[in-house]
Amino acid sequence: MTTRRYAAVRGLRAAAGAAVIALATVSVPAATAAPSAAGGGAAYGQRGVDRTQTPSAGSAAAANWTITGAGAGHGVGMSQYGALAQANAGWKAAQILKFYYPGTTMGPAADAMTLVVNVQDHVTSSTVTTSALAAGGGAFTVSAGGVTMSGGASTSVTFTGSGSTVTASCAACTGRKTVSGGTVTMRFADGKTLANVGTNRFDVGILTVTPSDTGTAVQVGLRVRLHDEYLDRIAEMPWSWPAGALQAQAAAARAYALSKIKDGLRPSCGCHVYNNTDDQVFAGYPASGNLPTWDAWKAAVRSGGSATTGQVPKYAGSVIRAFYSPSNGGWTQSSAEAWGTALPYLISAADPWSTKPGNPYLSWTRTVSGADLAAAAGVSDVARLDLSRRTQAHALGTVYAYAGNGATGKVAGTTFAARLGLPSSWVRHRVERVTGADQSALAAAVARSVPVDAQTVVLVSADPAKLPDAVAAPPLAKTLGAPLLLTDQYALPMPTVGELNRRVSSLKYAVIIGGANSVDQRVLDQLTARGLTVSRIDGADRYEVSKNVALRMGQIKPVTNAVVVGGAALPDAVSVGGPAVGTRSPILFTPAADLGAAAAAAIDTLKPTTTQVVGGPASVSGLVVSTLQKRGITTIRLSGANRYEVSVAVAGFFAPKMPGSKVVLAAGDDGFLMDALLGAPLGRPTVLAIHDHLPSAVARYLQTLNWLGTLTVIGGSSHVDDASVQAAAES
């Protein structure tokens, strides 16, 4: 099993006296030191035509892709940020370890043995310089083949390899200037000396330099005692964290190191462990910024132990191999899924602790070039990226990429993530759900996206039976810069009153959509009593209401585009609401057979140059299309086999005209269509889902969106259930 990690972070290491955090390109708050990104030996391996509209592959294939996700590292075993949340909740180390390593118990293990840490791997040469940690420090000796040379502070020794021999050269040393042998040792640890090796400073151990297997480089190892010399300098977790988290980390680090000692020396390096995220970050002597918290870490290392033992998690009486990483995506990954080796204490399970606030890996975003994405997936270009195959832990399982020419690439999720340098394989679209206790509360929640200084409010009926009057309202609200709110027929509901009160200092005007059968005069009177100037836009039927709303839009700003929808096709009408808002296009209802008089009058007055006919011929006939074309209007039909495919066609057509990174997801069931209408003011492409199922056409569409960052779900889980949302997020 490889132990190469990916997305490495160096925690608690500083060259200038302050903690330095470097997680690939994950942003970590400056005041928070981050755990090592794949701690505990991560093993991963190194986002006028009849048209059933689906987005074209061309632009997406060539463009950059936005990849979003959560977590950092392999996610097997303990989540360090999960442990932090548990410790903050009062959990003890034994509880934390039992949660992340099910079936284990905490107990003592002998740990006074020596292990070899590789501190420089396959380097052409290594130069080591000593410095004084305390008065009189800096002295060292270098020995090989029974010959020794010595030096003092600020003296440098350079080690080079040739074949099976290592040569140490030191121009300022006393006695000999060079020594050579199969192994060269450097002793310096007198309690007042630091050996500076690369970017590390060591105050303990014996340096051993051996030839590499290439014969032209050297391996630099440090022999240290596990019990304290090694564990005291492990920098996998900020030492300022609570004692429960530190003690759990110390026990896991000890267990991992013991498992590597049990494996024996690795032939490739002559070491048990590397001093980085290939195994565990052994940072050497702390930088000055970390010294104030070092005692807390050393206390955690010694907690529950003796002079020769320390606490470890055990399974069936044996010390476990305690893998850990900074954070998972809300589930621990099993070792079987990660690496193909099943261990009974490394299983997949829900981990709500890794989703608590304060975890910088709750969400991340990467921008990946189309070329890099194609290379990672093994295709020439990527027109569609299918990430729906998942592990039990909801991380990437198998990734399928589809090129514009139809070729298919297939790659393991961990390999895909590693090739792109992603922090983890928990790749998924970010999700936000907008809900309310009822539809009026939901409208008020969406209305908060409109600036509070808006002077106008638009109100429509909350009665689903009056939805046809409301359909045309969102584009008008956008044109007026107004929030869209709901009202009952005879009185303003409390959520609407609350939103009006929040805006009381700015609101001056109210526009009611629909006649008295939708919104009674008593509602207008209530608004007038609030000091608002109230107007109503109505009509004899839905066709006239939509016409009159469109004409009002034209009075405010010239209309260049209009959307035409069948008067009986409400699902089609609500799915185009967001795009109509985003492009400030009025929505006109027409009878199916021919362009209705109301729509024709609006078209003749507004004189748009382009229109989109939404829905198939059963909703809007071909005669409507030809009638619009005869008026010299460029017209395109956006259709599909059902309302869900129509929503995809609409979204695919309008998305390139609407800059942004969000897509609205709402229920397409007849009883829930108001949700899509209420999401329309967000001005984003809108796709419809069955309340308990994500249509395949919608999933395929989401897989083509190289720009998608967030799915905005409108309505609660009784309208679009959590499984459907998860399927969309993991599509």
Image: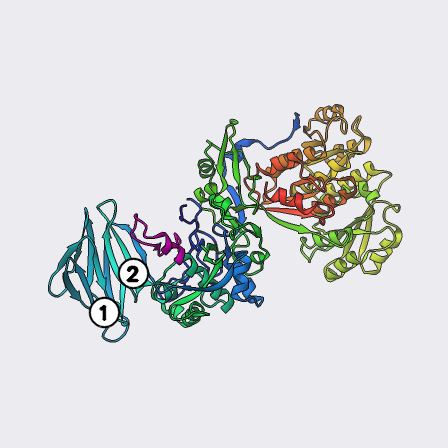
Q: Residues within 10 Å of mark 2 (few under 14, many from 20)?
A: some
Q: Name the residue under label 2.
A: 223
**Viewer-proximal residue, 477 or 203?**
203
Q: In which quarter of the image is the N terminus?
A: top left
Type of the residue with mark 2: Arg
Across and down, in percent, residue 616 comes to 73, 28
Q: Is residue 443 above or below residue 573?
A: below
Across and down, in percent, residue 479 comes to 70, 46
Residue 278 on the magenta span: yes
Q: Is residue 468 left or right of residue 277?
A: right
Q: In this picture, which residue range is highlighted in magenta?
A: 258-279
Label 1 and label 2: CA atoms lie apart by: 19 Å
Which residue lies most toward the left here? Answer: 175
Q: In this view, does 660 lie above or below 378?
A: below
**Viewer-proximal residue, 684 or 282?**
282
Residue occupying the point 69% across, 50% down: 481
Name the quadrant containing residue 626.
top right
Q: Name the residue under label 1.
A: 138
Can residue 562 be seen here?
A: yes
Can residue 683 be seen here?
A: no
Across and down, in percent, residue 524 comes to 85, 53
Q: How crowded is mark 1: few (under 14 residues within 10 Å), some or many (20 or more)?
A: many
Type of the residue with mark 1: Gly
